[in-house]
């Protein structure tokens, strides 16, 4: 699937400290309040930076939102890199682990879907490259006989991500009085993710 040195264009070095603080503060703000409800003054204050400094890096809130989405994607690619030996179910398990460790990433995806298309005219090339890399990985696995070749690779990619994130959108879970699962619940869910993807992609015999 994805490796840290793949074609999605990961940055060669970390952002300088002030920019990094702004990005981290913005991620927390956007994940909590979305694009429309977020406040630049709160982001600047949390980052210990002036609004003028923030605007020197990002011309407007939408540009900062895009930068946070891309940062999430880069971190995801680094965290669940595919080493050439892992199966697609194992990749799905790693993706589930990442979603548990970084729930703000999935919240950002939800906010982006709800708000971002109207606010930002140009989609990020990084997102397109990320998707293309996933599809190429599925095609390679199909050619190797590890994934049912009758599936559309685009559909497999979407279905795997849907399985991993299903508990974020299942009503009984989303509106539960106990929204934070314990370790045993996470372990059971992860096992179900891996099992579901195994059955999804198993070649027909």
Image (spheres, grey):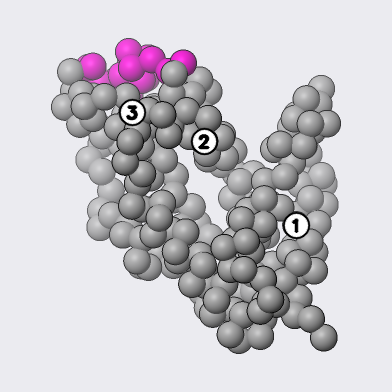
Q: Is residue 49 left or right of residue 176?
A: left
**Start-end of magenta stretch:** 37-51
C-alpha gap between disc 2 and disc 1? 23 Å
- Mark 3 is surrounded, within 10 Å at the Cα level, by few (under 14), some (14 to 19) or many (20 or more) other residues, namely some
What SS does tag 1 mark? helix
Q: Which of marks 1 and 2 precedes in the sequence?
A: 2
- Occupied quadrant, residue 139: bottom right
Q: Nearer the viewer, residue 187 or 58?
A: 58
* Contact between labelled residues 1 and 2, with CB atoms less than 8 Å apart: no
| Comparing labels 2 and 1, the label whose residue is closer to the camera | 2
Task: Please state which of the two labelled residues, at mark 1 or mark 3, is closer to the viewer.
Answer: 3
Residue located 51% across and 65% down the image: 134
Residue 193 shows which numbered tag? 1
Label annotation for residue 113: 2
Residue 179 vertical placement versus 109 (above, below): above
Q: How many marks?
A: 3
Which mark is on residue 129? none
Check the image and report above or below for 165 versus 50: below
Query: Distance between the Cα atoms at labels 2 and 3?
Result: 13 Å
Q: Which residue is mark 3?
A: 62
Can residue 31 be seen by looking at this rendering? Answer: yes
Q: Is residue 112 above or below residue 79?
A: above
Residue name at image x 40 percent, y 64 percent: 4
């Amino acid at each position: 699937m994805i490796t840290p040195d793949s074609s999605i264009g990961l940055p060669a070095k970390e952002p300088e400290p002030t920019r990094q603080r702004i990005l981290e503060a913005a991620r927390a703000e956007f994940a909590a309040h979305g694009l429309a409800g977020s406040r630049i003054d709160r982001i600047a204050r949390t980052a210990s930076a002036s609004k003028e400094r923030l605007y020197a890096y990002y011309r407007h809130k939408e540009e900062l939102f895009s930068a946070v989405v891309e940062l999430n994607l880069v971190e995801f690619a680094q965290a669940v890199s595919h080493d050439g030996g892992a199966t697609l179910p194992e990749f799905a398990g790693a993706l589930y682990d990442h979603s548990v460790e970084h729930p703000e990433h999935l919240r950002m995806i939800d906010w982006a879907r709800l708000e971002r298309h109207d606010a930002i005219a140009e989609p990020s090339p990084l997102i397109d490259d990320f998707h293309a890399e996933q599809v190429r990985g599925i095609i390679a696995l199909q050619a190797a006989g590890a994934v049912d070749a009758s599936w559309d690779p685009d559909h497999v990619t979407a279905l795997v991500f849907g399985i991993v994130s299903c508990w974020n959108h299942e009503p009984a879970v989303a509106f539960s009085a106990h929204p934070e699962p314990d370790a045993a619940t996470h372990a059971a869910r992860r096992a179900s993710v891996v099992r579901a993807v195994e059955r999804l992609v198993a070649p027909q015999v």
